[in-house]
Image (cartoon, rainbow, N blue to C red):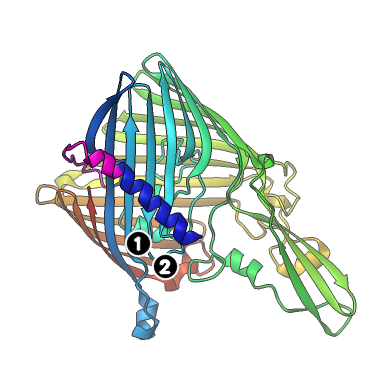
């Protein structure tokens, strides 16, 4: 079935491109390596009185990722990853509508070709509406701001993508949605989004990028000791995950943006679900035979009220966001629901001396009702004291630094990214050399983790890697 699905997609793309090429138009090029939209202008035709402009673009990439600890074990342990990948982007546009199809090609995956985005948009004066599978960014932060909440992320590739890319659009998972916007004059806009179902972050449960908390939930002990009995009793774990495809898991939001003097301001409200799962753990003793442990995974609903701001001030490009996230645990004593929190980010960038560019962004989350947290010890499930946030600090702060310098008419770029986990006392350093010539791009990058092994970054101390890649955009 998968073969026929892939074959059908290839045939459709061939027919589309065949019809386009038959019009005998030439190619155009787009030099924006991070733009996943169709980039090559193929041509246009006329039908029903409306001119239709077609465009096609894409990217062919080859990359190798080697992990340092694998090399230390010998070449038999080294796996360089997928090596090849590609993208094909198609677009058709008239004066009143456009259609976009972006495809991902990954030969090592069970499905050779995947739909990355596919949506249609209608332009009706100051009003436009989009429906389909799409990645949508809200907020003004460079990356991972508290207001960018619509699309889940593939957490298994975040750090290897960050090593040689300035944006994280490739990490986002597109979602089916309806998005509408209405322009109020030249500088203001109100927009709304409706997502009919839910998908969480993709978080691996095995392999080197599995976070410690997921390992704990996946590796439940096989036995448990229940005082006053001096014997170990077998333990059986039951992982129960909800079906999130129903309308019961819908999400929706409204956002208003405007310009006041030299400042860009945005206000938004969003009702959604936490992309990170919470877990309710219930132990049911069947003494003396065994103990059944039920792990009920939950995706907590929450309300977000947020504001963002951007301005050029004293030569600095400043961006700020702040949000209040209100969950159902308004007392902070329910271990299966994340506590409400306040989150903010502040970023700035500017060119320094000798053509050096500096970008800084600080993100922080402040947990409310922190003093009501329960225990993070799995054994506390027997006393119903387990809390999914147990052991976490009151605040979680990360500071991102990116410093870069270009040479030889901007063809060669040297840059280093540094991420510091303040409370966790850990960090990630990612140096990179990037050479770009027209639409050809070569990169040599790496990622190295340091600090406390119990921190969010330090837990990956054994995952230091080197990445070599080449890509051509067309």
* Helix, strand or loop: magenta stretch: loop
Is 26 in the magenta?
Answer: yes
Residue 5 horizontal side relative to residue 291, left or right: left
307 or 58: nearer the viewer:
58
Quarter of the figure with residue 187: top left
**Number of residues whose C-alpha sits closer than 10 Å to that of mark 1, classed few (under 14), some (14–19) or many (20 or more):** some
Q: Position of residue 291 (x, y in %)?
A: 82, 73
Does the magenta run of residues contain 312? no
Task: Work out which residue is located at the far left of the displayed protein and give it.
Answer: 408
Pointers 2 and 1 in contact (C-beta within 8 Å): yes
Q: How many marks?
A: 2
Q: Is residue 184 above or below residue 80?
A: above
Whether residue 149 is visible to the viewer of this picture, yes or no, is no
Residue sticking out furthest to the top: 185
What residue sits right under mark 1 in the picture?
429
The part of the chain drawn in magenta is: 17-33
Residue 450, numbered label? 2
Closer-to-camera residue (122/330): 122
Q: Left of 97 or right of it: where is 203?
A: right
SS assignment at label 2: strand
* Residue drawn at the location 39% of the way across and 34% of the way down: 99
Determine the image quadrant of residue 79: bottom left
Position in image of residue 135 (x %, y %): 45, 41
Q: Secondary structure at mark 1?
A: strand
Looking at marks 2 and 1 on the same chain, the residue that comes earlier in the sequence is marked by 1
């Amino acid at each position: 079935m998968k073969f026929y699905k892939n074959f059908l997609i290839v045939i459709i793309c061939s027919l589309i491109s065949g019809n386009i090429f038959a019009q005998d138009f030439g190619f155009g090029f787009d030099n924006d390596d991070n733009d996943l939209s169709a980039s090559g202008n193929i041509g246009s035709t006329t039908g029903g009185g409306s001119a239709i402009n077609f465009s096609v673009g894409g990217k062919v990439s080859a990359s190798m990722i080697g992990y340092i600890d694998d090399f230390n074990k010998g070449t038999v342990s080294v796996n360089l990853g997928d090596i090849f990948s590609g993208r094909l982007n198609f677009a058709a546009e008239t004066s009143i509508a456009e259609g976009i199809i972006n495809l991902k090609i990954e030969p090592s995956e069970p499905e050779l070709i995947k739909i990355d985005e596919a949506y249609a948009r209608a332009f009706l004066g100051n009003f436009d509406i989009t429906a389909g599978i799409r990645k949508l960014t809200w907020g003004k932060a460079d990356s991972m701001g508290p207001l960018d909440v619509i699309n889940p992320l593939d957490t298994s590739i975040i750090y290897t993508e960050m090593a040689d890319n300035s944006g994280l659009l490739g990490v986002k998972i597109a979602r089916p949605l309806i998005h509408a916007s209405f322009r109020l004059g030249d500088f203001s806009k109100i927009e709304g989004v409706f997502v009919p179902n839910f998908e969480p972050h993709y978080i691996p449960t095995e392999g080197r990028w599995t976070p410690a908390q997921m390992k704990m939930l996946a590796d439940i002990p096989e036995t448990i000791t229940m005082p006053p009995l001096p014997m170990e009793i077998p333990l059986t774990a039951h992982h129960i995950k909800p079906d999130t495809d129903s309308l019961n898991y819908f999400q929706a939001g409204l956002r208003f943006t405007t310009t006041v003097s030299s400042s860009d301001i945005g206000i938004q409200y969003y009702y959604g679900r936490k992309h990170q799962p919470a877990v309710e753990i219930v132990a049911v003793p069947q003494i003396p035979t065994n103990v059944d442990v039920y792990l009920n995974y939950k995706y907590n609903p929450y309300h977000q009220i947020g504001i963002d701001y951007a301005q050029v001030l004293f030569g600095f490009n400043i961006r700020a966001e702040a949000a209040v996230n209100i969950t159902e645990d308004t007392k902070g004593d329910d271990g299966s629901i994340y506590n409400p929190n306040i989150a903010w980010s502040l970023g700035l960038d500017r060119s320094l001396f000798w053509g050096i560019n500096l970008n800084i962004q600080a993100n922080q989350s402040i947990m409310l009702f922190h003093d009501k947290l329960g225990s993070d010890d799995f054994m506390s499930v027997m006393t119903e004291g387990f809390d999914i946030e147990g052991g976490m600090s009151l605040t979680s702060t990360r500071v991102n630094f990116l410093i870069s310098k270009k040479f030889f008419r901007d063809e060669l770029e040297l840059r280093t990214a540094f991420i510091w986990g303040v409370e966790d006392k850990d960090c990630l350093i990612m140096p990179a050399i990037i050479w770009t010539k027209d639409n050809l791009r070569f990169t040599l990058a790496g990622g190295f983790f340091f600090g406390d092994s119990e921190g969010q970054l330090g837990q990956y101390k054994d995952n230091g890697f080197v990445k070599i890649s080449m890509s051509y955009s067309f």
